[in-house]
Amino acid sequence: ARHAEPRCETWTLDTLDVLTAHRDIAHVVVVTADTEAGREAHVRGATVLDERPSGSLSPLNSAVRQGCDFIAAELGDGPTVTVPADLAYLSADVLAAALAALAAAGAAHIPDLDGTGTTLLAAPRAADIDPHYGIGSSALHAEHGFARLVDVDPRIRTDVDQMADLVSDPGWTLGPRLSAV
């Protein structure tokens, strides 16, 4: 039997469901150029911003900066965490533990399982988020003052950069849409 390749939207929807229903999150801001993802985020109660690329930053870093600028200007510039859409094993409990660890650390980031990339990036104020996502982002975030938190649930460190990243501990549960694929 041939298995369908999961599409980015599959784990994006799972991630949106966790974020928008989470008791510890006051606002979800999604910056995207994807009309369908924007519509789905809006339906779930998120604020959706049309992605506006910046010439000096990569598209991802530009989107993060755009979202943080919006939060700083419109939502009171409080504690902010960037969460990528490709966290296949994200759940409310996994997220709650990561948020607590980040809040205790101040400006901090959670590296991916390889230890080179970054999954979550957080600061006490949105204006303090200085994104350096991309190759070697964990070292760059640490260099720019974001503490490196590795003693967290490995599921929050597992992003999906390639299909092999979906191979996990047998006790881990994929998001409901992704597990259905």
Image: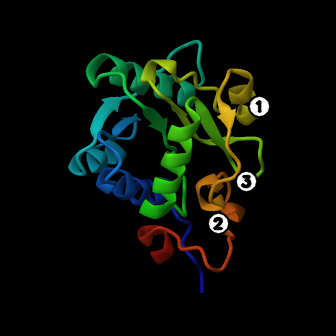
Camera-nearest residue between 148 and 47 = 148
Q: Residue at x 54, y 61 (%)?
A: 88
- Cα distance in 3D space between marks 1 and 2: 24 Å
Question: Do the residues under discs 2 and 3 have CB atoms within 8 angstroms?
Answer: no
Question: Do the residues under discs 1 and 2 have CB atoms within 8 angstroms?
Answer: no
Residue 148 is situated, as x and y percent measured from the top left of the image, at: 70, 38
Q: Could you tell me the amino acid type at mark 3?
A: Leu
Residue 9 vs 48, above or below: the answer is below
Residue 129 is situated, as x and y percent measured from the top left of the image, at: 52, 24
Q: Nearer the viewer, mark 1 or mark 2?
A: 1
Per the image, label 3 sits on a secondary structure element best described as loop
The answer to which of marks 2 and 3 sits earlier in the sequence is: 3
Q: Residues within 10 Å of mark 1 (few under 14, many from 20)?
A: some
Q: Residue at x 62, y 37 (%)?
A: 109
Q: Residue furthest top?
A: 56
Residue 69: tell me if it is visible: yes
- Cα distance in 3D space between marks 2 and 3: 12 Å
Q: Residue furthest bottom?
A: 1
Question: Mark number for residue 166?
Answer: 2
Q: Could you tell me the amino acid type at mark 1?
A: Ala
Residue 169 is situated, as x and y percent measured from the top left of the image, at: 68, 74
Q: Residue at x 40, y 35 (%)?
A: 32
Residue highlighted by disc 3:
113
Q: Residues within 10 Å of mark 2 (few under 14, many from 20)?
A: some
Per the image, label 1 sits on a secondary structure element best described as helix
Q: Could you tell me the amino acid type at mark 2?
A: Leu
Question: Do the residues under discs 1 and 3 have CB atoms within 8 angstroms?
Answer: no
Residue highlighted by disc 1:
139
